[in-house]
Amino acid sequence: MRLRIGHTPTFDDVVVDTAAERRIVFVGDAGTGKTTLCRFLARAWLASARRRCAVIGTRPHEFDGLRVAHTDRSRYSSWSNRSDLLVVVDDADGVPADLVRGLVRHRFGLVMLTSYGPAARLLTDRGLVDRVYGLHRPRDTSGAGGELVQGRLDWPMQLVDVVVDPRGPADQPRHRWAIGSGAR
């Protein structure tokens, strides 16, 4: 599955290829679209009825509306060797480091993690991920193409800078207050 997620600062397309990249980290400051991008990719992954998704993190309710297989972080080892399973670790910095390392080492179809820096740095320094994407939003949100916000110095060196494409309402995370009210 190849999906465009945005462009580089030099306006080259950035495409996530899940056939070549099985362990992906999205790093960025709050509000840069890490969770939204994971929802978008999870929605595309789940387009095949044979595939499943599991979400681990501090706010798994933001993935409501998708077919989520399991969110109990204590039983992830029973998921191993499942090539049909996407595991999303949302806010990997808030999940115990040994759990994150264990999830990345298992053989899943795809593992996506979001981080604001420390977890991404830990995983890349140990060579446990295939690709790290550094997410940015243009400073000028009017669409006039403003300057980029610079990535932080604690981000991994090997990352690909990405200005994220805008996403639709179905890709936005569902917050606690919207669940059950029918709001999207």
Image (spheres, helix red, strand yellow):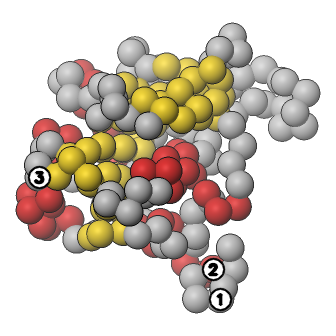
Q: Residue at x 21, y 53 (%)?
A: 96
Crowding around mark 1 (Cα neighbors within 10 Å: few <14, some 14 to 19, many 20+) is few
Q: Are marks 2 and 1 in contact (CB under 8 Å)?
A: yes
Give 23 or 67, whichever is nearer the viewer: 67
Q: Which residue is mark 2?
A: 178
Q: Residue at x 33, y 26 (%)?
A: 20
The percent position of residue 49, horizontal first and vertical second, equals 38, 63
Vertical order, 83 against 169 (above or below)? above
Give 55 or 46, whichever is nearer the viewer: 46
Quarter the N terminus occupies = top left
Quarter the C terminus occupies = bottom right
> Is 130 on the left-hand or right-hand side of 10?
left
For the question of whether residue 122 can be seen, the reply is no
Q: Which residue is mark 1?
A: 181
The percent position of residue 61, horizontal first and vertical second, equals 46, 72
Q: Which residue is mark 3?
A: 80
